[in-house]
Structures are given as structure tokens and as C-alpha cells.
Image (tube, rainbow, N blue to C red):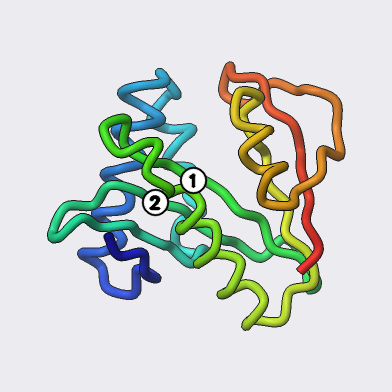
Amino acid sequence: MEVRRADEEAAVEAALSVRRSVFVDEQGVPAHRELDGQDDAATHFVACDGDRAVGAARLRQYDPARAKVERVAVLPSERGRGLGRELMAAVETHAADEGYGELLLHAQVPVVAFYEGLGYEVTSEPFDEAGIPHREMRKPL
């Protein structure tokens, strides 16, 4: 497995394909909500097993001191292999290298414990996003 920043158009398209599979096809998020027009302003990450994209994430500036982790996704057949942790490590390293002091994210409620295990802290009550309960979480870098 390899996790890398998606610098080429083909790698970004591969990351988008994973996101469509997970969020639109699996979870029923409307395509217009998933493809929200923010991808051009984001740094993308892709996890690959050989030539096959199996995971994705994106990072966007939230304000000058903070960035927001978004669209973290791993294909169902690849879950439980540590790819989510590897994706998050790549995102966090890049964010720290870019000088951000804090990351925030909106975690789906069922995966809050995963992010807590990575050092994120819940900072909100549950709220609805695309019909799915979420919690805001933050982590200092």
C-alpha cells in the first residue's frame, strides 16, 4: 500500500472515484453534496494498492492557522487494514509542513472513536450533514 499526495490529475480523479464509491454509492450522499465545488481549493491524498485507488482524503485551508480534513474514505473491501490511519498521517504531516497549528474535521458519529484514537477531541454536539449525524473534532499539531 502507498499513501501519497495526489499531485497529478489522474491521481485526483482516482481519489474522487473512491469518494463517489463510498459517499454516493455506499452511503447515499447526493452527488452534488459530495462533489461540492471545493476540490480545486484542496490538497488531495490517495491510498493505492498497486494501480488501484482504495482510499482518499482532502485537506483545505479553514483559516490562516487551521486546516480542515475532509472526505476521508476507504473502500469497504479495504477497511480494517490501517489505511485510514495512514491517510490521516499523510494529511497531518502535510498540514504541519504547511504551518497549520490545528486541524478540524466533521466526523460521522460511528467513526468518532477512530479519530479520538488519533488524538482528535470532540468539540460539538451531534449535527446533521448530508443526512448523516456528525461531530466536529479538533486536534492541535
Tell which residue pokes out farthest to the left in this image.
Answer: 51
Image quarter in which the C terminus is found: bottom right
Q: Nearer the viewer, residue 89 or 7?
A: 89
Residue at x 73%, y 74% (from the top left corner) = 100
Residue at x 45%, y 23% (from the top left corner) = 29
Q: Please rate how many residues cluster around mark 1, counting C-alpha atoms within 10 Å: few if below 14, some from 14 to 19, many from 20.
A: many
Q: Is residue 134 above or below residue 34?
A: above
The span from disc 2 to disc 1 (Cα, nearest Å) is 6 Å
For the residue marked with disc 1, what is the amino acid? Val
Q: Earlier in the sequence, mark 2 or mark 1?
A: 2
Q: Is residue 86 above or below residue 76?
A: below
Residue at x 27%, y 60% (from the top left corner) = 1
Quadrant of the image occupied by residue 77: top left
Q: Residue 105 in the image: state x and y as whole percent.
A: 68, 46
Q: Is residue 84 left or right of residue 137?
A: left
Residue wearing tag 2: 56
Q: Nearer the viewer, residue 11 or 138?
A: 138
Quadrant of the image occupied by residue 3: bottom left
Which type of secondary structure does the marked residue at label 1 adopt?
strand
For the residue marked with disc 2, what is the amino acid? Ala
Q: Does the CB distance between marks 2 and 1 fall below 8 Å?
A: yes
Residue wearing tag 1: 72
Q: Residue 120 in the image: state x and y as whole percent.
A: 75, 48
Q: Residue 58 in the image: state x and y as whole percent.
A: 49, 56
